[in-house]
Amino acid sequence: MAASGTELIEIKGLHKSFGDNHVLRDIDFAVGEGEVVCLIGPSGSGKSTLLRCVNLLERPDGGAVIVRGENLADPDCHLDAARRHVGMVFQQFNLFPHLSVLENCTVAQKTVLGRKTAEADRIARANLERVGLTEKAAAYPAQISGGQQQRVAIARALSMDPMLMLFDEPTSALDPELVGDVLTVMRDLAEEGMTMLVVTHEMAFAREVADRVVFMDGGVVVEQGTPDNVIGNPRHERTRAFLRRVLDPTHALPA
Amino acid sequence: MSSATVIEERTALSPRRKARRNRILQYVVIAMLAVGAAASADWGQIAHVFLEPQLIRSAFADGLLSALVKTLEYTAGAFLIGLVAGTVLALMRLSPIGPYRWFAMAYIEFFRGLPAVIVFIAFSLLPLAFGGLIIPFDPYGVVWLALGIVAAAYMAETIRAGIQAVPRGQVEAARSLGMPAGLAMRKIVLPQAFRIILPPLTNELVLLVKDSSLVFIIGVSATGNELTGFGRELANTQSNLTPLVTAGLCYLIITLPLGFLARRLESSSVKAR
Ligand SMILES: Nc1ncnc2c1ncn2[C@@H]1O[C@H](COP(=O)(O)OP(=O)(O)OP(=O)(O)O)[C@@H](O)[C@H]1O
Ligand SMILES: [Mg+2]
């Protein structure tokens, strides 16, 4: 299967079950180079699972996950090599607590990419500057706030020079006043042309930054399109019901 | 049932007073027992048998300190072997490859189920079974091996628990940065696992210090004597327990601070969470 040129990710006929729980049912979708795609949908709809299938943290039961022309779902694929080009940011940050902020950003550069310490440090510091945390380079994760930790996690991923960034609800574990800093970093990243696939409940962010919004429910893609269409003028009742709940939680009727 | 009886019951003794009365009673009984024991003991004889100053001095002259150093050397080497072999066993125990897992499980259950004394006796008889067998670094080699083989079984379980206590997200983060499984284990999981198990590992070190006393079963020469062997030999020749008591105190000098350290580490790691 060849890549169609500008598509960075192509997902074809993707299936995933956990036991009897059929979580992803025949997903087809693609992300083009430089595109910012936001994935929205109710809890349990399979957003995280889909995202985790893109770098094979979850092994699909069927279908193809083609990243830069390489099918990662192929058992003979060089997964570790492929993952170097795909950055991932987790809801719970998952910084390495035994390493300093700087070391968090250099450990994979040195061990995976074989960069020398001086070069790895330089690149790590440049990326820490991008997320506004140069002064925290020597701190340990436990010593900085959640918002700062998440920005370090972004810098850690960027230090590997990824072609593509995956975000799984990067602001859901944050105190409300810390959400803005992380979203600002992500917006800057999008403006620099990074290809991003973002699972999020931040509708304002999706509306403003996304090129395309994909609404998932029950393991299928229900609808997708520009933010104005999907969020502003949804065609499907399921999308409307979901948006009502998210945008106006206190007044939504019980589902 | 009238309210008067209730009041009456209440005025008798409040629960707090009752508890205090019980406590005082127990202190009185304990004090009486202690005084009775002290009065009936022959202190002169006790001091002579257990803590004869003259013999304490001669214990130092006869090499108490070198025995102490031997104990430390035996323990340190065995701990190192136990740590390395225990880590390997823990990784085998968690391996997706069946035979590794089975071997590790069998090893761990075998050596944890056996009295350490039996392992030591077996080691003392090894030269009989294998004529030409020479274990290097005599006498250290045998001692380290015998102690380390048993220690590895215990440490393997501790280390496995530590590895499993590292959150899954850590491995996922490492793998998503392109680290292969082995590298993620070495750079990310193991350092955190050892931090988690530092308190139980310290406790295992204490056990090992004491188990090093089993060395006398292997039958090392007098120059290889650690604290217990040293104290026992001297106590036999002098028909007095003082050397043994002195050796015992030396153990406490090692083990009490370690135990204290373990408890400190434990409470600080609880706080960190
Ligand atoms: N490792 C797993 N083992 C078993 N079931 C799982 C596992 N991961 C996810 N699931 C199940 O798959 C379904 C989809 O989960 P997923 O995390 O993808 O949903 P989500 O859309 O990300 O939801 P949320 O918004 O709550 O994060 C859920 O029913 C969940 O219970
Ligand atoms: Mg999720």
Image (cartoon, grey):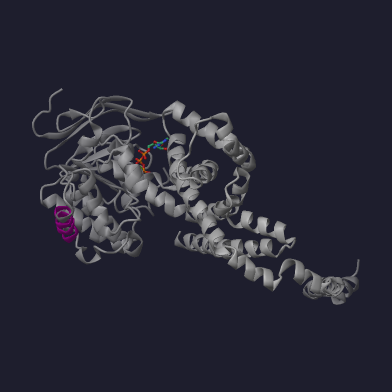
Residue shown at 17%/44% (left/top)? A162
Query: Quick one: B120 or A83, which is closer to the camera?
Result: B120
The number of discs equals: 0
Magenta region, residue range: A119-129
Based on the picture, tell me whether residue A197 belongs to the magenta stretch: no
In the picture, measured across the screen, residue A154 lies left or right of residue A33, that is: right
Query: Quick one: A144 or B67, which is closer to the camera?
Result: B67
From what the image shows, is residue A176 above or below residue B100? Answer: below
Asked if residue A144 shows in the view, the reply is: yes
In percent of width and height, residue A108 lies at: 24, 47
In percent of width and height, residue B2 lies at: 90, 69
In percent of width and height, residue A37 lies at: 19, 42
From what the image shows, is residue A156 above or below residue A47? Answer: below
Q: Quadrant of the N terminus of chain B?
A: bottom right
Asked if residue A240 shows in the view, the reply is: no
Ligand 1: quadrant of the figure = top left
Give the main secondary structure of the magenta stretch: helix
Q: Quadrant of residue B92?
A: top left
In percent of width and height, residue B30 lies at: 81, 71
Residue shown at 58%/65% (left/top)? B253
In the picture, measured across the screen, residue B61 lies left or right of residue A16, that is: right
Q: Quadrant of the C terminus of chain B?
A: bottom left
Based on the picture, tell me whether residue A122 belongs to the magenta stretch: yes
